[in-house]
């Protein structure tokens, strides 16, 4: 166990590893972000519903999982180490006063305590078990405060260069009556750091799943979407294996 990550036990033989970068809103006691407590319950701090859905999916698929252990307001695991927004000073129009004016030493400390151990843990698992497919799980808000546009999709499937899993998943979701965005509500060609690092760099296919957060914000919603996604994820893994 580490403050940087939480591990969900599962069968390495499942061929899958689930990764949830933004599953936690934990802020360590020695970090003062300078934000109101209620803000830590909002999407700027955590992918709402992801931790519960991740545990449900790992149980249903009997696969391993790694969940980020601190809020993305502390450090964003789904950004490159040198990305400007790695430790955000502003998120969706909301200021994070405690992240402004950090010294190089403070920046390095967060990298050393959280970002690097998290990605090292994922890398160790991948090296040890060589999963056939990664599952990247996130949730998105129905609309951003800084964007008036509605987001009608129930699910988004994200990818960068490697779209092997996406091309299998999208027709399956359509046949299941699920409104799915193809590289929407945002593009994996723009924001895909964790899967670029652990999926594309290792030639491991990945299924990048975004679920609209209002659909998984309670226990019945999590159960409903676990039931809907489990057969799709399993079918994607099986078809990828057939093409090996």
Image (cartoon, rainbow, N blue to C red):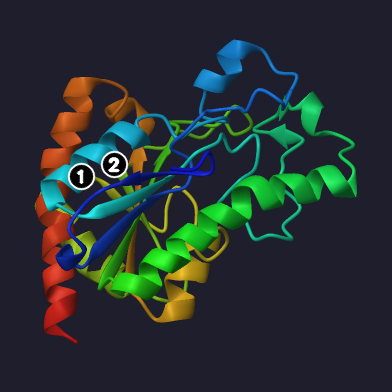
- The residue shown at (20%, 55%) is 63
Could you tell me if residue 178 is visible in this image?
no
Give the quadrant of the C terminus: bottom left
What residue is rendered at 12% in x and 46% in y? 60
Please tell me which residue lies in front, 161 or 97: 97
Report the disc number at residue 57.
1
**Residue 31 screen position, x and y as percent:** 72, 27
Task: Describe the element under mark 1 as helix, strand or loop.
Answer: helix
Residue 216: give x, y in percent of width and height. 28, 29
Residue 116, located in which quarter of the rendered image?
bottom right
Displayed quadrant of residue 71: top right
Pointers 1 and 2 in contact (CB under 8 A)?
A: yes
Q: Going 15% across and 31% down the picture, which residue do you hit?
A: 223
Q: Of residues 82 and 183, which is closer to you in this image?
A: 82
Image coordinates for residue 170, horizontal then vertical, percent = 23, 61
* Circle 2 residue: 54
Residue 203 x %, y % = 39, 81
Does residue 152 sit above or below 60 in this rendering?
above
195 lies above or below 2: below
In three-dimensional space, the C-alpha distance between marks 1 and 2, rounded to whole angstroms, equals 5 Å
Q: Residue furthest bottom?
A: 244
Q: Secondary structure at mark 2?
A: helix
**CA neighbours of label 1 inside 10 A, class few (<14), some (14 to 19), many (20+):** many
Dot 2 alpha-carbon crowd within 10 angstroms: few under 14, some 14 to 19, many 20 or more: many
Residue farthest toward the front in the current orientation of the protein: 1
Residue at point 61%, 51% (across, down): 115
In this view, the residue in front, 171 or 193, is 193
């Amino acid at each position: 166990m580490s403050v940087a990550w939480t591990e969900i036990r599962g069968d390495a033989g499942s061929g899958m590893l689930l990764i949830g970068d933004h599953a936690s809103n934990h802020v360590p006691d020695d970090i003062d972000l300078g934000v109101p407590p209620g803000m830590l319950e909002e999407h700027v701090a955590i992918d709402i519903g992801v931790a519960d859905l991740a545990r449900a999916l790992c149980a249903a698929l009997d696969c391993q999982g790694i969940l980020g252990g601190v809020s993305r307001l502390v450090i964003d695991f789904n950004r490159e180490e040198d990305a400007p927004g790695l430790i955000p000073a502003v998120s969706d129009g909301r200021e994070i006063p405690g992240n402004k004016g950090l010294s190089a030493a403070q920046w390095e400390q967060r990298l050393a305590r959280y970002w690097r151990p998290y990605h090292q843990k994922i890398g160790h698992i991948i090296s040890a078990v060589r999963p056939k497919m990664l599952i990247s799980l996130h949730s998105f808000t129905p609309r951003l405060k800084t964007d008036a546009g509605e987001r009608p999709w129930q699910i988004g499937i994200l990818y960068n260069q490697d779209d092997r899993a996406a091309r299998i998943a999208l027709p399956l979701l359509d046949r299941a009556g699920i409104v799915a965005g193809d590289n929407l509500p945002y593009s994996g060609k723009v924001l895909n750091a964790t899967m670029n690092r652990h999926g594309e760099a290792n030639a491991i296919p990945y299924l990048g799943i975004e679920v609209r957060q209002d659909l998984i914000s309670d226990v019945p919603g999590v159960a409903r979407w676990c039931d809907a996604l489990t057969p799709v994820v399993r079918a994607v893994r099986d078809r990828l294996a057939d093409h090996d």
